[in-house]
Image: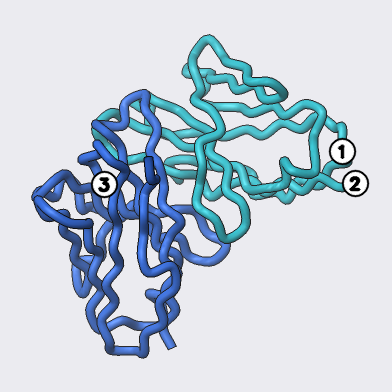
Amino acid sequence: RKEVEQDPGPFNVPEGATVAFNCTYSNSASQSFFWYRQDCRKEPKLLMSVYSSGNEDGRFTAQLNRASQYISLLIRDSKLSDSATYLCVVNMGNTPLVFGKGTRLSVIA
Amino acid sequence: NAGVMQNPRHLVRRRGQEARLRCSPMKGHSHVYWYRQLPEEGLKFMVYLQKENIIDESGMPKERFSAEFPKEGPSILRIQQVVRGDSAAYFCASSPGTLVGTEAFFGQGTRLTVV
């Protein structure tokens, strides 16, 4: 079983749509959780950290369910500029970040 | 405050040559991580270093690959006798301390092409 699993997509959505991504992780000892964004042929950049209480940043909402070991990202009112690959990332303390393969999003005009 | 700097951005090597990839972490960061990304794949951890020490090299191939982070100067990822399968994007990240609850900042990557 892979450490971090994501639906690769692609998700093709019209502008203004709401889209949700899920991610599951296998290690119950995981401590920190993040969503990174990666544009084509660019480096990954932190989108947001994910907390047990859930957190929101503008149009983006992230949630963590430790019991079920999954993380979600919700994007409301999608913009063309949201088109990218979204990477689910977990960390188990002193170990390095473990990345999912990413979910590709295309927002269409 | 410059970000994580990697060079070269693009590197072409013939099979059998050596590739040296350099990474200068952000100012004040003493932890460096190297990742490899194959086309259409996710980032795979290779090695985690602190100044002069290798902390975790569990993702590093046993042969031909080595990494260092000297007291002075950038971190170096060295690939000897490159093969076509080494063609990938190699990303370096840095952090001020361990990654519990903190993000890692990534450089723009080095794209290695082996011909």
Callout 1: chain: A
Left or right, B95 with reference to A3? left
Q: Which mark is residue A109?
A: 2
Q: Is residue A1 visible?
A: no
Chain letter belonging to callout 2: A
**Which residue, given by chain and number where applicable, does mark 1 sit on?**
A15
Say which chain tag 3 marks.
B
Residue B15, how many percent across, how many down?
34, 89
State which quarter of the image contains the N terminus of chain A.
Answer: top left
Q: What separation in Å lies between label 2 and label 1 (alpha carbons)?
A: 6 Å
Vertically, is A40 above or below B64?
A: above
The letter of the cyan chain is A
- Label 1 crowd (10 A; few <14 / some 14-19 / many >=20): some
Q: Quadrant of residue A20?
A: top right
Task: Give me the residue at 53% from left, 9% from top.
Answer: A53
Q: Which chain is blue?
A: B
